[in-house]
Amino acid sequence: MDTIIKFENVDFRYEGNSDLSEPLAISGLNLEINRGDFVAVLGHNGSGKSTLAKLTNAILLPEKGRVLINGMDTANEEEKFNIRQTVGMVFQNPDNQIVATIVEEDVAFGPENLGIEPLEIRKRVDDALKTVGMYDYRLHEPHKLSGGQKQRVAIAGIIAMQPECIVLDEATAMLDPRGRQEVMETVRMLNKELGMTVVFITHFMDEAVTADRVVVMDNAKVILDGTAQKVFENIELLRSVGLDVPQVTEIAQYLSNMGIDVPKNILKTQDFVDAILKVLEVQC
């Protein structure tokens, strides 16, 4: 497989090398993310998931080991510009990423700083806003938008820089359910239709189940890594680290353990309904 992000035995602590009494935020991390993947990273607060996100973009640098982006070492200062062109970041609070007073000007900010010529910037801005469904708001003031709309503008600003990978660090945490849905639909479209690599940091189980792969972190380490079906089979382990599983998965496992012919790895409500209807049809 074609690897775009690679962690090689990475350690990181926020107090730096001078105070080794501080606990590691990332410990001995080995992880590869392939081009075109949609990876959800789960974990409770302090587990290391947001630190992992910032390490991918050279916002943070490892104390030990290496983070490679398309083979470029994030510790190499000369590669930092190329690394940040390759991996775009979207953060939790969209207000912290919006820098202009008009939507289209905000989306143009990144390409302008890359030195893109004006006609190309115009095209990128229009294409990016259309991609996230915000083109009709291009002349609006960002502060008058809803939370979900602001976050989609922030995503458009990253898309306009044409990165190969987008990392979203709890990008839906401050949004209402409608805003979360808007952002998730946009992110899934970027991955499935445009082929963009997505690393999605979240603590919402219903968001994680849509990913191709789920990585679970606890105490600075990866403790589970696999498909959503495989990861959410580990109900007791997930609960032991302060996480839950989708409710339908828990019910399906309970029924399966009771001897009812229902798959244990159901993740979505409609799949659960279909399984129950199938059981009822057999019994009738």
Image (cartoon, rainbow, N blue to C red):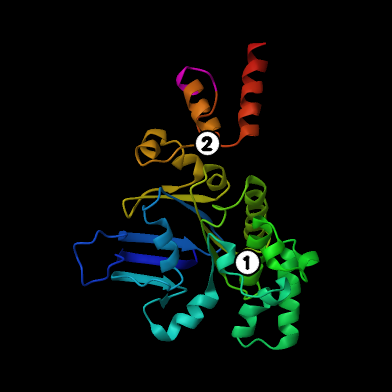
Residue 41 in the image, given as x and y percentages of width and height: 46, 53
- Left or right: residue 120 versus residue 136 is left
Labels in figure, total: 2
For image coordinates 52% across by 27% down, the residue present is 252
Image check: 138 left or right of 247? right
On the image, the x and y values in percent for residue 65 come to 30, 69
Front label number (1 vs 2): 1
Identity of the residue drawn at 19% across and 65% down: 20
What segment carries the magenta color?
256-261
Q: What is the magenta segment's predominant secondary structure?
A: loop
Task: Point out the residue furthest to the top here.
Answer: 284
> Gap in Å between the C-alphas at discs 1 and 2?
29 Å
Q: What residue type is labelled 1?
A: Ala
Q: Mark 1: which secondary structure? A: helix
| Residue type at tag 2 | Pro
Residue under label 2, please give it: 246
Q: x, y percentage for residue 195? A: 63, 63
**Mark 1 or mark 2: which comes first in sequence?**
1
Give coordinates of residue 51: x percent, y percent: 39, 62
CB under 8 Å between callouts 1 and 2? no
Q: Which residue in the protein does label 1 denote?
A: 154
Q: Quadrant of the C terminus?
A: top right
* Residue at (44, 68) in percent of width and height: 56
